[in-house]
Amino acid sequence: MTGITEQTAILAKYFDLNQNGKVLAEYVWVDADGHTRSKCKTLSKRPSSAEDLPEWNFDGSSTGQAPGHDSDIYLRPVAFYPDPFRKGDNIIVLCECWNNDGTPNKFNHRHECAKLMSAHADEQVWFGLEQEYTLFDQYDNVYAWPKGGFPAPQGPYYCGVGTGKVYARDVVEAHYRACLHAGINISGINAEVMPSQWEFQVGPCSGIEMGDQLWMARFLLERVAEEFGVKISFHPKPLAGDWNGAGCHTNVSTKNMREVGGMKYIEDALAKLAKRHKEHLVLYGADNDMRLTGRHETASMEAFSSGVANRGASVRIPRSVAKEGYGYFEDRRPASNIDPYLVTGIMVETICGAIPDADMYKEYARESE
Ligand SMILES: *[C@@H]1O[C@H](CO)[C@@H](O)[C@H](O)[C@H]1NC(C)=O
Ligand SMILES: *[C@@H]1O[C@H](CO)[C@@H](O)[C@H](O)[C@H]1NC(C)=O
């Protein structure tokens, strides 16, 4: 690890060089495997909005996003953020992927999600996502676990402080600062139940910005971890056995739910969620069945359940919300590897109503073709 850190220090001195007025724009997109990819473009000036940014393209046959005979995928900028790595006026650009024939790429779930969000803009839906993840070393061992063995059982690690209880705080701190620099609504971090598992929270974010900010925060995490020679896994059950899985608990509220008497709207929403439990689970992350077993603070996949302050329920109503009679609810089913556009999209579709030209299933079906 030292070697990598030293190289980063050497690189840093080139960052003071004059860019001669040019702005570097790192274009980021979601690939076929639920990770991000990126490449960089020089711009002559800083854009004032995403519309100012030029469309670009990449070879989709190299990323599993397009066939070789028709491999151009177009990158359409949708948002941009200050770049915490290159700093200055440089930016990171989040893009949607579009096919040559003018249709959204099959891994572009943002397009339909954005339609649902804007159709229901009056409801002012807010989200908060708790992204859990696990660190691995370059040889695919859980980071800092004893070679060929296991650490002591779970217990001291959750929000742990001190040697032997917490690992890779440096990576986590660096990521936290990178998110703040980029303007991500990161609301906190904590060490998780399994050693070398962490969580960061993003929110509140409204509508489509939830998915945008979570993807950007994930990009920043993998990018930061690269400098430490650490790998990030978003798998919901990275390790079999008595080790906690990783989820992406999703806080949801509409304007009505947040106002006095809002509990009525929360209960209506839960009744709607109960009816579509199975459909939601299809969109709540691959391999989630390995995590939602009814153990390790999860609900079983079989049936929908909800309860006040119940960490074993599919959906939890925080005690403070039940007491005050308004607020939000927490869907505990989504796995750590969700596409947040699918989850926030189906959530709004279920609670606020379907719209004719967006259907999160049809969307998902395109991906699983
Ligand atoms: C979600 O709600 C829980 C309480 O139920 C809270 O502790 C957490 O900070 C919230 N997370 C986000 C990202 O809003
Ligand atoms: C970030 O949170 C603040 C409130 O803390 C809110 O006003 C703002 O709209 C949020 N940003 C996004 C992108 O939703």
Image (cartoon, rainbow, N blue to C red):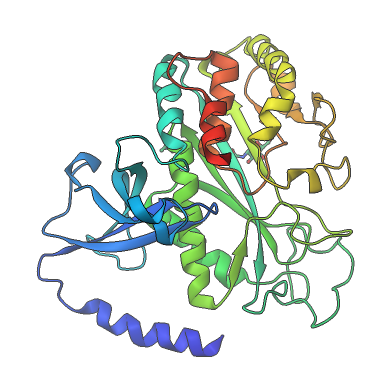
In this rendering, is residue 218 above or below 335?
below
Q: Looking at the picture, how far across and down is residue 150, in whole percent?
A: 85, 74
Q: Is residue 223 visible?
A: yes
| Figure quadrant of residue 111 | top left
Q: Is residue 291 visible?
A: no
Q: Residue at x 62, y 22 (%)?
A: 327
Q: Looking at the picture, how far across and down is residue 118, in whole percent?
A: 39, 22
Q: Considering the image in quadrants, where does the C terminus appear?
A: top right
Q: Looking at the picture, how far across and down is residue 42, in whole percent?
A: 18, 63
Q: Residue at x 72, y 71 (%)?
A: 142
- Say whether residue 219 is left or right of residue 81: right
The quadrant of the rendered image in which ligand 2 is seen is top left
Q: Nearer the viewer, residue 46 or 342?
A: 342
Q: Nearer the viewer, residue 272 or 187?
A: 272
- Say whether residue 193 is left or right of residue 23: right
Q: Residue at x 26, y 82 (%)?
A: 14
- Say whether residue 138 is left or right of residue 274: left
Q: Looking at the picture, how far across and down is residue 159, in whole percent?
A: 73, 58
Q: Residue at x 33, y 60 (%)?
A: 83
Q: Considering the image in quadrants, where does the N terminus appear?
A: bottom right
